[in-house]
Amino acid sequence: MSSAANLRPANDSQVPNDLAAWWLPFTANRAFKARPRLIAGAKGMYYYTPDGRAVLDGAAGLWCCNAGHNRDEVVAAIQAQAAELDFAPAFQFGHPKAFALASRVAALAPGDLDHVFFTNSGSEAVDTALKIALAYWNISGQGGRTRLIGRERGYHGVGFGGISVGGIVNNRKFFGNALAGVDHLPHTYNRAEQAYSRGEPEWGGHLADALEPIIALHDASTIAAVIVEPMSGSTGVLPPPKGYLQRLRQICDRHGILLIFDEVITGFGRLGFPFAAERYGVVPDMITFAKGVNSGAVPMGGVIVRKGIHDAFMKGPEWGIELFHGYTYSAHPLACAAGLAAQDLYRDERLFERARELEGAWADAIFTLKGAPNVIDIRTIGLVAAIELASKPGAVGARAYEAMERGFNEFGLMMRIAGDTIALSPPLVISQDEIGELVEKMGKVLRAIG
Ligand code: PXG
């Protein structure tokens, strides 16, 4: 690229609204650019297109805007922070709101999950948790514990650590061998046994026992950590079977293996509790979070770490760095300011409790879609629902794609899709009327696509 012929002058007069340059993530780019779905504004439960059409947000953006969109309090906090302190380094320095937000997040977590390491995304949170696990064993005289165990159909972001422990074939197969020394638990979905279950399925708790032969194969002394989403979100909403997470905790305890809950989706109220760990009465050794921490307003993620793990690092000379890891934008002031404002909203409006109180009505409403064309399963938990559609022969994903496209363009409803599963996860401020509106629109979409 250094030859003179390649040095084009900068072009300040690009065509406005040209869609060519941006390569969209996890998107069918050619279809998108042929028929763009543009979003220009948002308020509360709605998105607005550039021509002012309202679209009900059935997905909290991407599972993140738990307090609803453009809340005045969050907007004001970000504006004030930008004027007061744009950026402060987090390496060897700190700003007050980072400490305040860490305290707030730690206070929401159960047990002795007392320390918070900030990142800028869920993917970074996962890679950070995996690295802390490996480093913990390294400094604790058990450096042989290097293996990581994930689960089929797990999503842990797109870093090399995350795709290695993740269990989504398309997220892995194009990218080489990723991390070595990783094994996977079986996923927990079985339609024959679980179809149309509300909440935690009765069947499948025993699948946690599949960890035992994996441990027997590798030996516990080589295993650092197990990582699972308490509820798998991205692969189509797979609530944990009854007893499953508790059994996983028991087995990890028996073998001295760390347990990481990836709560990037389930954190901050999605399942009616601050964290799913509390819903299930299980204290993991680390919790990863992102998205809802500041209601999606500024990129942010992090890891909550148990006291014993954190304290194990606090050794050596006082002036010495304890963990060689971090990001330029860790605990960015704008993200922290948004986080404090969002946490205030969650507390003052009792939004986590609200999700718990709405869970039954939400499930009742969603289950009225049973019997709609092509629906083969419905799953609900917290303020989450999955509607699984039969795939068109030879075109897995095409039917749900049409639902997503026509939902947005014709019916004023935003949803997420995974294969032929539609995932719904509205902001936690959704009203009963808006639940009715969402389900009515969803029914129209299902009937329209046939
Ligand atoms: N862990 C979990 C459990 C997630 O759900 C990540 C890690 C990665 O977070 P970042 O911030 O790096 O994207 C996620 C992200 C979907 C969807 O449609 C889900 C996610 C992201 C985009 C779409 O289900 N989850």
Image (tube, rainbow, N blue to C red):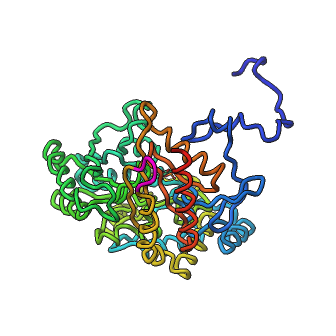
- Image quadrant where one finds the N terminus: top right
Q: Is residue 373 magenta?
A: yes
* Residue depicted at x 69% and y 69%: 75
- Does residue 207 appear in the picture of this structure? yes
* Residue extent of the magenta highlight: 371-375
* Residue 10 quadrant: top right
**Does 75 sit above or below residue 53?**
below
Nearer to us in this view, 114 or 436:
436
Nearer to us in this view, 195 or 57:
195
* Residue depicted at x 69% and y 73%: 72
Q: Residue furthest bottom?
A: 348
Residue 391 in the image, given as x and y percentages of width and height = 42, 39
Nearer to us in this view, 442 or 36:
442
* Residue depicted at x 50% and y 61%: 425
Residue 334 in the image, given as x and y percentages of width and height = 64, 64
* Residue 69 quadrant: bottom right
Magenta span: chief secondary structure = loop
Is residue 346 found left or right of 360 in the rendered image?
right
- Does residue 320 appear in the picture of this structure? no
